[in-house]
Amino acid sequence: MKNLESQLQQNCITWFRLLYKESYALIFAIPNGGKRSIITATIQKKEGVLSGIPDLAIISNGKIFFIEMKFGKNKLSENQKKIHDILKLNEIKVFTCYSFDDFRNIIKENL
């Protein structure tokens, strides 16, 4: 079975980079998920990888916000909820996106 959440994220990134190709805004993925060896996971944890950090960061005009990508009935994990709460307490916007339309609306309302 194909990873539909990954496909959604790839489509959103492609659209964003086509629309904002003038370096007006920067978007990048934060690869916290995925399978890795125990050794690699241990090294990455020591380097600062943190469970629950959103999938995408967007920077524009001195501001940053984050987007967690979900698909279908997927819900935020407890770690993701905790990180979202910390970001919000620090007045940093964080969104959960379930579709391309969600993503497009989030971008248009926040850039």
Image (cartoon, rainbow, N blue to C red):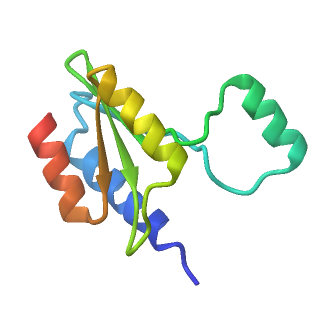
On screen, residue 28 versus residue 65, left or right, reads right
In the rendered image, residue 8, in percent from the top left (x then y), is placed at 38, 65
Would residue 84 be seen by someone viewing this image from the given angle? yes
Residue drawn 10% across the image and 41% down it: 109
Residue that protrudes farthest toward the top in the picture: 62
Residue that protrudes farthest toward the left in the picture: 109
Q: Where the N terminus falls, by quadrant?
A: bottom right
In the rendered image, residue 63, in percent from the top left (x then y), is placed at 25, 20
In the rendered image, residue 57, in percent from the top left (x then y), is placed at 38, 35
On screen, residue 28 versus residue 96, left or right, reads right
On screen, residue 72 versus residue 49, left or right, reads left
Quadrant in the rendering for residue 92: top left
Quadrant in the rendering for residue 56: top left
Residue drawn 87% across the image and 46% down it: 38
Q: Where the C terminus falls, by quadrant?
A: top left
Residue drawn 54% across the image and 44% down it: 79
Quadrant in the rendering for residue 21: top left
Would residue 54 be seen by someone viewing this image from the given angle? no
Q: On screen, 3 above or below 67? A: below
In the rendered image, residue 58, in percent from the top left (x then y), is placed at 32, 34
Q: Tell how many labels.
A: 0
Q: On screen, 34 above or below 61? A: below
Residue drawn 39% across the image and 69% down it: 71
Residue that protrudes farthest toward the right in the picture: 39
Q: On screen, 61 above or below 53? A: above
Q: Nearer the viewer, residue 29 or 97?
A: 97
Q: Nearer the viewer, residue 78 or 57?
A: 78
